[in-house]
Amino acid sequence: MSDTTNKFCMILLSFIFIVVIYISYKYSIYPFYSYMGYTFFELTFLKLLLISIIPALLSIFLPKNLISISDLLSYILYFQVIVPSLTIPFYVLNDIDFSQWFPYWFGIVSCYILMTYLSKFKTLKIDFEINDKLGNLVIFSIIAMSFLVLILSYKPDINLLMSTTTIDELYSLRMDYRDQNENVNIFARYFFSWDAKVLIPLLVILGIFYKNKVLIFIGVISQLLIFSINGQKSVVLGVLLAIGIYFLSKKDKSGYKLFYIISCSIILFVLLDLLLGIGVFSNIIVRRMFVVPGVLTSYYLDFYSSGIFHEYSDSFFSGIIEPQYSQTAARVIGLIYFNREELAANVNFFSAAYSNFGIVSVYIESIILCLMLYVIHSIGKKKDRAVYLSLFVTPIIALSDSALFTTILTNGIALATLVLFLLSKKNE
């Protein structure tokens, strides 16, 4: 298909996708989760179509091919931030204050559009390079050291995973992990996150790249050991996503293909739920990936429209600025809207930024992110594209439910950038 035909199909699929998400929320998600604090205000079909126009048209900016980290992130933000933030508030909140919402929408859409063009900018000239053999030695040393720290701190037992047969037992693993986390030092926690999201998926990808079955085997077993500690499905999905992006990025029109895979899969899942009357896909996949980001964005902007912000007092300004709240933003929203003190309502980095200084911090953090992506691509252009993109897929997905600076440090963007610099250059 021509680019024009692809763009038309993407707009049409976006309309269908938005309507399907609404139907899924109305008939499957809201009835099941209303007790938790989910709200719903029915829309007429005309209003639903009207609020779908702008997000559907924004799909035309999505890049044809996945060339840079900004291209990959633009797809993630489109489905998990742009579409939910521009549509879900209309049926989750009773009233939309456009004077409050428009600057926010303008900020996130501007950032998104800029990301779709970043790979076309002239990159920085970075002359300093490291020897390939030395770079690989440092990378494998980092992986070995960090995983050793993880083994010594958490003492994983794969037998626990093999004996887990029910969902309740899996949740028990997660609770044990939370208790265990309180007894390990902060460096071990960082290494755990970096291993799960960056280093071990990279080991698998390097095994595929070098056609080394030993590296693949070690990577898979290591990731299973990590999964046996915390029981989080994202640990397994992270590796699968990295592998998927590795192979997809090698294909022509990889961006368009990613769009079709995501949109068509979700539409199919919701239709299956409606036809079979089960709601499994809606509650597990649609709710977590697309609905929760929109619901939480609605609640964040609704609450912090009061003008009383955290002012980064619960992060790097801790001890410098007197906090306005006794809890983090995620805990505040969890308590106010879900009536659960233990619930951390983590939201995308745009909304997390809004909780600090309002729209000003949304714009500032958007600029910081775009500059960071520009620098990363300037480094990554000399590397194998498939390895480069698969290295970052799990860390940047975290931007859909984490603050920017948390994602940079804890979720591994900074570490992935260091590893990218050390990676061997692509074959010319």
Image (spheres, grey):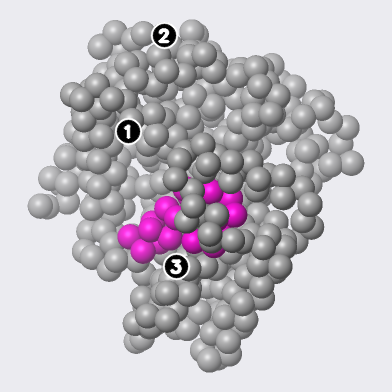
Identity, as a three-letter code, of the amino acid under mark 1: Phe
Q: Is label 2 in contact with label 1 (beta carbons under 8 Å)?
A: no
Q: Earlier in the sequence, mark 3 or mark 1?
A: 3
Q: Earlier in the sequence, mark 2 or mark 1?
A: 2
For the point 44% across and 45% down, the residue is: 165
For the point 56% across and 73% down, the residue is: 419
> In the figure, residue 228 lies in which quadrant?
bottom right
Query: Spatial distance from mark 2 to mark 1, Cα to Cα?
Result: 22 Å
Q: Earlier in the sequence, mark 2 or mark 3?
A: 2
Q: Dot 1, how many residues are within 10 Å of its Cα: few (below 14), some (14-19), or many (20+)?
A: some
Residue located beneath label 2 in the image: 41
Query: Spatial distance from mark 3 to mark 1, Cα to Cα?
Result: 26 Å
Percent from the top left, x then y, of residue 29? 39, 21
Q: Dot 2, how many residues are within 10 Å of its Cα: few (below 14), some (14-19), or many (20+)?
A: few
For the point 36% across and 64% down, the residue is: 243
Q: Dot 3, how many residues are within 10 Å of its Cα: few (below 14), some (14-19), or many (20+)?
A: some
Overall secondary structure of the magenta stretch? helix
Percent from the top left, x then y, of residue 78? 39, 40
Identity, as a three-letter code, of the amino acid under mark 2: Phe
For the point 72% across and 50% down, the residue is: 181
Identity, as a three-letter code, of the amino acid under mark 3: Val
Q: Is residue 50 above or below residue 360?
A: above
Which of 220/69 is in front?
220
Q: Is label 2 in contact with label 3 (beta carbons under 8 Å)?
A: no
Q: Which mark is residue 281?
A: 1
Which residue range is magenta in the image?
A: 224-244
